[in-house]
Image: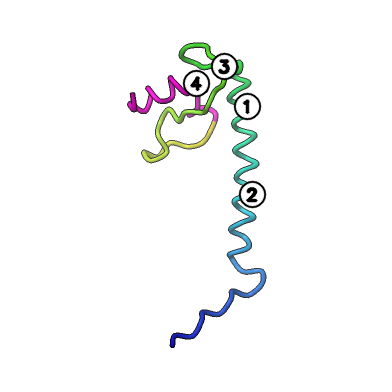
Amino acid sequence: MIPAAPKPAKGTHTRLKGKRKRLQAKADKVVYRAVVARDGGVCASCGAFGVQLHHVRFRSLGGKTAPENLKSLCLKCHTKAHGLR
């Protein structure tokens, strides 16, 4: 029988991981609100309401989650931007 792994000590990186995640979520909300306000709350392509944020330079290619790399797109335009339809 293999012994169970010991539990991490209180205050180790596992707790910080969750704290960092919460701080990042708060920062993302601030960025989201700033971009939507900048774009007037409508899709930058067609003017529809109900927007999502689109990374102009994809995160997988090194794009940052910063207002200058984001634009508001409706679901239809966001799907087209990713070439899914």
Task: Give the class, few, some or many, for how many residues have Cα within 10 Å of label 1's Cα (few <14, many ≥20).
Answer: some
Query: Closer to us: mark 4 or mark 2?
Result: 4
Res. 63 image quadrant:
top left
What is the CA distance from the residue labelled 4 to the residue labelled 2?
A: 26 Å
Q: Residue furthest front?
A: 1
Residue 74, labelled with which disc?
A: 4
* Label 2 CA crowd tier, 10 Å (few <14, some 14–19, many 20+): few
Q: Secondary structure at mark 3?
A: loop
Q: Which residue is mark 2?
A: 22
Q: Amino acid at mark 4?
A: Cys
Residue at point 36% right, 38% down?
61
| Quarter containing the C terminus | top left
Disc 1 to disc 2, C-alpha distance: 19 Å
Q: Earlier in the sequence, mark 3 or mark 2?
A: 2
**Residue 83 magenta:** yes
Residue bearing mark 3: 49
The x and y percentages for residue 24 are: 60, 45
**SS for tag 4?**
strand
Name the residue rendered at 49%, 21% in the picture. Answer: 73
Question: Comparing marks 1 and 3, which lies closer to the viewer?
Answer: 3
Is 83 rendered above or below residue 43? below
**Distance Cα–Cα, label 4 vs label 3:** 7 Å
Q: Magenta stretch containing residue 22, yes or no?
A: no
Q: Is residue 32 above or below residue 3?
A: above
Marks 1 and 2, the one that precedes in the sequence: 2
Q: Are marks 1 and 3 in contact (CB under 8 Å)?
A: no
Question: Looking at the rendered structure, which numbered label has been put on residue 34?
Answer: 1
Given residues 2 and 60, the one toward you in this image is 2
Disc 3 residue type (three-letter): Phe
